[in-house]
Image (tube, helix red, strand yellow):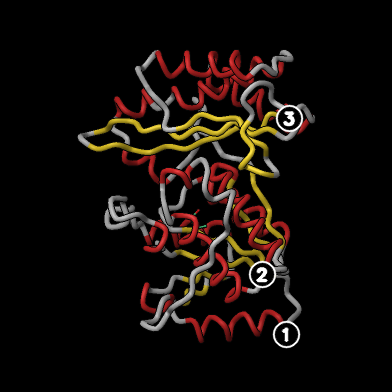
Amino acid sequence: MPLVFTRRHEFLKYIKEQKEKRNSIGFVPTMGALHAGHAQLIKQSKNENNCTVVSIFVNPKQFGPTEDFAKYPRTFQNDIDLIESIGAEAVFCPTVEEMYPNNFNTQVSVSGITEVLCGAYRPGHFNGVTTVVLLLMNLVQADRMYLGQKDFQQVQVVKKMVLDLVHTTNIIMVPTVREEDGLALSSRNRYLSPEARQIATAVPKSLAAAAKLFLQGETNVTKLLKASRQELNKFQLEPQYLEFRKISDLTIKFENTIQEETVLAIAQFIDSNDSKVRLIDNVILDNNSTNKQSLEDLISRAFR
Ligand code: PAF
């Protein structure tokens, strides 16, 4: 059973003990509703550190007024069971009041790369993310922090914050875990009705279609987008965004030809039971052998 901390001061005492024992600390920040994607992050942290801390905190600051904070899935006992099965040492699950006492006045904000892609449609979202992540990082004092590639922009934003503020925690991006048919694992997938779940396969298919052409040598944005959109059109889906961006500077959008270091990112709403489920996903378009393998894996799942 992992040690479970809800209070900052008790958790800090535990961290101090780990430091005194010279244990390396791996940190997996989460909002709970854990799935196999989180399990992958926790496993990698277990492999690379003496002590793994998982945080569970549904952060109100990163949800907009019309977003799903209140109904965000909370599955605490399942989360603890999963964490225990992997063998993480500690869980930090503070209340909102514990994280943000009344006089909490600080906001961490990264400019530029937070204003495109998801940031263009979710004002304030990344300020909420960077504020909570820096606060958590300062509490955990980890050697390494693990984030999933599915939230690609989040990873780049956190990396930039860490670089700018000279934080000493290493940020490690872990590849997206996918279902058999290519759908990226996400806590929000549970909102999908069976029909909507079927339609959602168009999202990985749209990425796989572009990836397939890319692996054949295509770099023309119009042609890549056409292949991608064809998959969405089959279900009359119009993406919120579907864009080729430069990885090291997401403010740069490729309009004609994709260059080195390209990510293709998508956000797509899927209608499900009178509500709309927002899914995001991405692929890195790079020919190096590890990435090529993950593109081939996506293609074979999406078009099986
Ligand atoms: O990716 C998430 O689950 C959240 O954005 C994070 C990093 C835990 C911050 O609340």
1 or 2: tag closer to the N-terminus: 1
As drawn, the label of residue 299 is none
- Image point (40%, 83%), residue name: 103
The answer to which image quadrant residue 268 occupies is top left
The three-letter code of the residue at mark 1 reads Glu
Secondary structure of the residue carrying tag 1 is helix
Marks 3, 2: nearer the viewer: 3
Dot 2: what SS? loop
Q: Are marks 1 and 3 in contact (CB under 8 Å)?
A: no
- N-terminal of the two: label 1 or label 3? 1
The residue indicated by pointer 2 is 142
Residue shown at 43%/75% (left/top)?
99
- The reply to whether residue 50 is in sight is no
The yes-or-no answer for disc 3 within 8 Å of ligand 1 is: no
Q: Residue at x 28, y 50 (%)?
A: 66
The residue at which mark 1 appears reads as: 20
Total tally of numbered discs in the picture: 3
Position of residue 65 measured from the top left corner of the image (x, y, whole percent): 29, 55
As drawn, the label of residue 286 is: 3
Mark 3: give few (<14), some (14-19) or many (20+) Cα within 10 Å.
some
